[in-house]
Amino acid sequence: MSIFLSFYAFIAIGIAEGGLGVLIPSIGETYNLNSANITLLFLSQVTGYIFAALASSILSSRIGLARMLLLASMSLTFALIIYAFSPYWWLMVAAGSLLGLGIGFIDAGINSYIANQQSQADLMGLLHGFYGIGALLGPAIATTLLAVKLPWRGVYLVFANEYPLQLYQQPLVLLQV
């Protein structure tokens, strides 16, 4: 069960990251942005991810892997909800750091979990393949939703709804380990 949820989590983070490119024109139009301004969203996401990469081992050793993954899923979901409802560009940029933080902690946490399971360590490449599937699906899902006249904010609500399964199941499964 935990391996299935790990694959699901990597598909979900791939979708969330991959969908942004398709949504950039709509986001730019909503906030009246130029290319330089839009770059701030990417920078904020990367900043959150880097912080998570540097802090994940400390955080997981203090609160445990399951709790770290729960916080990561909550951070990711909350960021996507902020994306969907943010009336201000600066708030969306700030939420980008939360998104990167959530993705970074999920990435580091699940990688650590699988690497520490000696019988399943060979699944690491497959895990990252599932991220690739998500990154491939993200633009396709976003494009399809935009084509049926769902606003870009609605696309982020759809993306946010991918996480409830992961949010509650992954940490519960890991707590049993």
Image: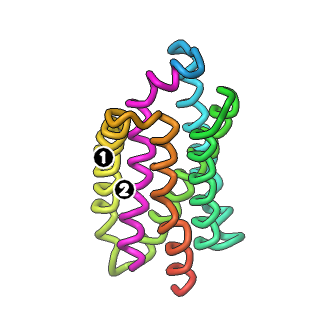
Provide the secondary structure element on which disc 2 rests: helix
What residue is at 63 percent from the left and 46 percent from the top? 98
Query: x, y percentage for residue 83?
Result: 58, 39
Q: Which residues are magenta?
A: 1-28
The quarter of the displayed image where residue 125 is located: bottom left
Query: x, y percentage for residue 158?
Result: 46, 49
Provide the secondary structure element on which disc 1 rests: helix
Q: Along the horizontal axis of the image, is 8 left or right of 153?
A: left
For the residue marked with disc 2, what is the amino acid? Ile
Looking at the rendered structure, which numbered label has been put on residue 137?
1
In the rendered image, which residue does mark 2 sit on? 11
What residue is at 33 percent from the left and 61 percent from the top? 127
What residue is at 46 percent from the left and 49 percent from the top? 159
Q: Report the quarter where the N terminus lies.
A: bottom left
Label 1 CA crowd tier, 10 Å (few <14, some 14–19, many 20+): some
Label count reads: 2
State the predominant SS element of the stretch in magenta: helix
Chain-order first, disc 1 or disc 2: 2
Query: x, y percentage for residue 49?
Result: 56, 45
Label 1 or label 2, whichever lies nearer to me, is 1
Nearest the eye: 177 or 97: 97
The answer to whether residue 2 is magenta is yes
Residues tagged 1 and 2 counted as in contact (Cβ below 8 A): yes
Looking at the rendered structure, which numbered label has been put on residue 40?
none
For the residue marked with disc 1, what is the amino acid? Leu
The answer to whether residue 32 is magenta is no
What residue is at 50 percent from the left and 60 percent from the top? 163
The quarter of the displayed image where residue 99 is located: top right
Q: CA distance from mark 1 to mark 2?
A: 8 Å
Q: How is the image coloured?
A: rainbow
Label 2 CA crowd tier, 10 Å (few <14, some 14–19, many 20+): many
Q: Is residue 138 above or below residue 72?
A: above
